């Protein structure tokens, strides 16, 4: 099973993704750990990434998913802000998507509290501007507790995919 947890920065993708990975005993990958040095430097200076910056990173993430799909699955936490990015990550038809959504002010306050992260709170607006809300997958409101979000995600993931036994 391949599971991708998406959302703008500061929504809790790593927390939810790692919780799901633990529950289903799958490897967990945080897409932030796979950005090339140039992307990290750009974001650290307060500049948002563009499509050209993101393409090699997204292709590398898709390759990781392909490898792990063959060995039983994985969980990836990745912003995947645009539908075109999600299409690159959809390496099989039955990828399970979980989209984290929340109020800008709540996310802003979370980002201000983060230490030692290259994605600065000031770039949040550019993420919201880029975000294309998908019509599929589970949408989780981040104003809930982590435990409530994980419970909802577990119920969603335990539902068999249509056409699969």
Image: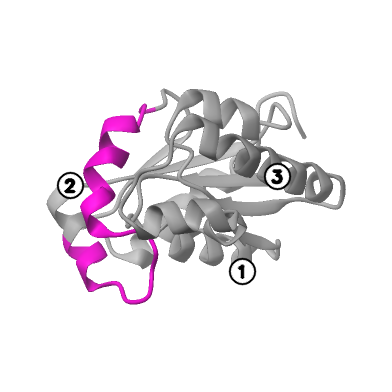
Q: Residue at x 59, y 41 (%)?
A: 159
Q: SS at mark 1?
A: helix
For the record, the magenta segment spans 109-133
Q: CA distance from mark 2 to mark 1?
A: 27 Å
**Which of pointers 3 and 2 lies earlier in the amino acid sequence?**
3
Give the dominant element type of the magenta stretch: helix, strand or loop: helix
**First reached walking from the N terminus: tag 2 or tag 1:** 1
Q: Residue at x 75, y 50 (%)?
A: 73
* Residue receiving disc 3: 60
Q: Measure the alpha-carbon separation of dots 3 and 2.
A: 30 Å
Q: Which mark is residue 103?
A: 2
Left or right for 71, reference 127: right
Report the mark closest to the observer, 1 or 3.
Answer: 3
Q: Residues within 10 Å of mark 2 (few under 14, many from 20)?
A: few
Mark 3 vs mark 2: give the one in front.
3
Q: Position of residue 62 (x, y in %)?
A: 70, 40
* Quarter of the figure with residue 85: top right
Q: Is residue 53 left or right of residue 144?
A: right
Image height check: is 84 above or below 98? above
Q: Is residue 126 magenta?
A: yes
Q: Based on the displayed image, in which of its 4 quarters is residue 146 positioned?
A: bottom left
Task: Write down the residue under mark 1.
Answer: 22
- What residue appears at the point 83 percent right and 47 percent down from the top-left corner? 67
Q: Would you place residue 165 above or below residue 77 in this image?
A: above
């Amino acid at each position: 099973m391949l599971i991708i947890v998406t959302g703008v920065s500061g929504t809790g993708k790593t927390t939810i993704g790692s919780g799901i990975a633990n529950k289903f005993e799958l490897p967990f990958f945080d897409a932030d750990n796979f950005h090339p040095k140039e992307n990290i430097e750009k974001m650290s200076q307060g500049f948002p990434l563009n499509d050209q910056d993101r393409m090699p990173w997204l292709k590398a993430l898709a390759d990781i998913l392909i490898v792990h799909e063959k060995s039983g699955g994985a969980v990836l936490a990745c912003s995947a802000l645009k539908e075109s990015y999600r299409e690159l990550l959809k390496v099989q038809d039955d990828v399970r998507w979980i989209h984290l959504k929340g109020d800008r002010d709540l996310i802003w306050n979370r980002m201000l509290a983060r230490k030692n992260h290259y994605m600065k709170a000031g770039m949040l607006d550019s993420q919201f501007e880029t975000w294309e809300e998908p019509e599929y997958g589970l949408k989780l409101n981040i104003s809930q507790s982590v435990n409530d979000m994980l419970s909802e995600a577990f119920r969603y993931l335990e539902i068999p995919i249509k056409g699969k036994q």
